[in-house]
Image (cartoon, rainbow, N blue to C red):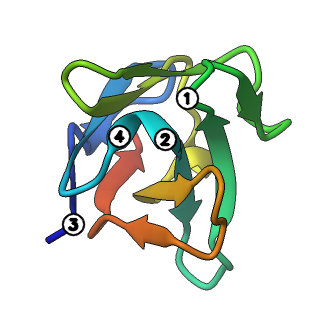
Amino acid sequence: QVQLVESGGGLVQPGGSLRLSCAASGITFSIYAMGWYRQAPGKQRELVATITSGQRTNYADSVKGRFTISRDNVENTVYLQMNSLKPEDTAVYYCNARHQYMATISYWGQGTQVTVSS
């Protein structure tokens, strides 16, 4: 059974930082590209950042220079370090695992709420 369990969300003031974690089980983690997506109320889900098994990263323009995605292939965990948070970063953040050779195989976590507010 595949599980992606996110943690680390919460309420933070503008300018603050949070670190999200996503622990994966039930998959061969090293052959999955991992990503973080987010969905704000009334908006579509959007890509935040992705990282391949070879550590190649990609970021949405809105988070470049503020967010950093990383992965630990021993702990089967992907992280999202979020700095200089803005109110517009408020959303539910979802972890995604996508098979690098069969892109139709994709899994989602349950999401974790991030709220940036004073």
Q: Circle 2 sits on which residue?
A: 31
Is the Cβ of the residue at disc 2 closer than 8 Å to that at disc 3?
A: no
Gap between marks 1 and 4 measured at Cα: 8 Å
User: What amino acid is at disc 1?
Assistant: Ser
Q: Circle 1 sits on which residue?
A: 53
Question: Residue furthest toward the bottom?
Answer: 42
Gap between marks 3 and 4 measured at Cα: 11 Å
- Residue 22 to residue 4: above or below: above
Marks 3 and 4, the one that precedes in the sequence: 3
Q: Residue at x 50, y 19 (%)?
A: 15
Quadrant that contains the C terminus: top left
Is the Cβ of the residue at disc 1 closer than 8 Å to that at disc 3?
A: no
Q: Circle 4 sits on which residue?
A: 29
Q: Residues within 10 Å of mark 4 (few under 14, many from 20)?
A: many
Q: Residues within 10 Å of mark 1 (few under 14, many from 20)?
A: some
Is the Cβ of the residue at disc 3 closer than 8 Å to that at disc 4?
A: no
Report whether 80 appears left or right of 25: right
Say which mark, if any, is on residue 2.
3
Residue 78 point in image, percent of width and height: 37, 32
Gap between marks 2 and 3 measured at Cα: 14 Å
Q: Residues within 10 Å of mark 2 (few under 14, many from 20)?
A: some
Report whether 103 appears left or right of 28: right
Dot 1 lies on which element? Answer: loop
Report whether 75 appears left or right of 54: left
Q: Residue at x 65, y 45 (%)?
A: 48
